[in-house]
Amino acid sequence: MASNIGLPSLSIVFEKAAQAAANRSKRGFVGVFVRDTKAQGVHSLSSAALIPAELGADNQAYIERAFTGSDRGQPSRVVAVVIAPQGEENSDSTAAFETGLGLIEGMSLDYIAGPPDITAAEKTLLAEWVEGRRAQYFTEKAVIPNAAAAPDSMGVIHFCETDGSIAAGQKTYTAGQYASRIAGLLAGIPAGMSGTYAKLPELTAVTPRSETELETAVNAGKLVLLHDGQAAKIARGVNSLTTIPVNGKEDWRKIKIVEGMDLITYYLRTTIQNEYIGRYANTYDNKCVLLTAVTGFLQSLEGQGVLSPGESWADIDEAAQERWMKSQGIETAGMTAQQIREYQTGSWVFLRAGGRLVDAMEDFQVLFNNL
C-alpha cells in the first residue's frame, strides 16, 4: 500500500541557540483592522496620505497612528483591513474579523492590531490565529490590548493600559484605540535595536504605576508605558510569554530576540520555498551550496546586531540524516561520517543552523569614582 507523499516538508526547529536562519529585506509591515461601512477590503498603504478618505475620521486616525513609529524608525507599509461593523444582533460575532484575517493570510506582516473596539472574543481569535500562523513558520505578532486572560505567547504583545489613562493633551485613548500606534512603533524598530524606552512624544500621561508595579507588570508579560516627567516610553520591550517552553530560553520573552528569530525563520522559509524546492537535484554538492547561502546570510545578520559576531554556522544534520537512512532500512554501522553526509536522501534535506541572538543595551550599572 502506497504511503502518502504530502506537501514538501519544511521543518524549522528552534533549539536553545535559536537556530535556523532568515531574512527580511524590508522591515516594518503592519496590519491594522477597522470597522466601517465604506472602503471595505484590504488597502496596502505606503504612507498616511493614501488612507481612504471615505473612512470615518476615527478610523483614519487609527490607521494613521500606525505610521508614526518612533525616533528609532517607522514602518514602511501599513495594510489596512476594513471589515463590516457589528450590529446589535451580532455584537458577539467574530465572523467579519475572521473573514478579514483570511484576507491577509497570503501576506507577510510583522505586527497586527485588531479594530480599536476589539471584543473579548476577537482578542481570543486573534491570539489563536497568530499562534496557528507561527506554527506554520509565518512571523506575525499581534498587539492585543487588555486581554482577559494572559496570552503567554511569544507571538502576542499584551498591551496593558487603563482605558482613558493614555492622554495626549486633552485627547484620551483606550488601550484598543492606541494598539495601532504600538504595532507601528514596534514594526519600525530595526532588528539591532529594542523597543525598551522607545518614546511616544505626543503623550502627556499614561497609567500611573510605581516602580514596583511596573516591574510586576513586565514580569507578568505585559507591555506597559511609563512617563518619567519628560516623555512617555515603553517600559520594557516584552511579549506575553511567561512559561518558558522545553528547550526554550528566558530571553524569548524579549520582543527583540523573537524579532531576530522571526527574521531567521522568514529567510529560511521563503528562500528554501522560492529558490530551492523542486529546482535542484538533491546531491551533496547542492546541499553545500544551500549551506553556503544560509551561512552567508547569518553572517550578514551578525553585522546588523541580530546575531553575535563569529558564532553563526550551518551544516548537514548528520544525526537526522542517519535516522532517515535507518528508517529506509539502510545499514549505517560500517559507514564513515562523510559517507553518511554524502548519502542521497531522496527528496529530504536535513540541515542544522545556529548562532547566538544578541539583546540590546537595556540594563546599566555605572560606578562613578569621585577622585
Image: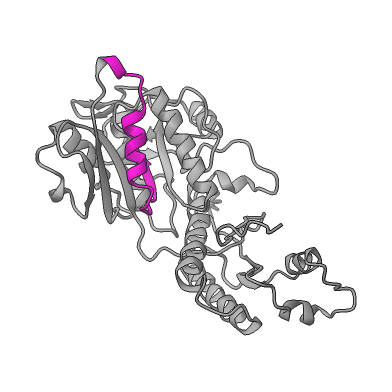
Instruction: Give the left or right position of residue 227, taking residue 213 as reference.
Output: left
Task: State whether residue 125 appears in this view.
Answer: yes
Residue 281, position in %: x, y? 58, 80
- Is 328 drawn above or below residue 221 in the view shown? below
Q: Front-most of 76 and 250?
A: 76
- Is 30 drawn above or below residue 218 in the view shown? below
Q: Which residue ends up furthest to the right in the rendered image?
A: 334
For the point 63% across and 65% down, the residue is 354
For the point 55% across and 59% down, the residue is 7
- Is 189 drawn above or below residue 24 in the view shown? above
User: If the image is split into quadrants, where does the N terminus sit?
Assistant: bottom right
For the point 50% across and 57% down, the residue is 260
Q: Front-most of 228 and 247?
A: 247
Residue 157, position in %: x, y? 45, 38
Instruction: Give the left or right position of residue 363, taking residue 28 as reference.
Output: right
For the point 84% across and 80% down, the residue is 336
Task: State whether residue 184 appears in this view.
Answer: no
- Write down the region rendered in magenta: 89-114
Residue 107, position in %: x, y? 35, 53
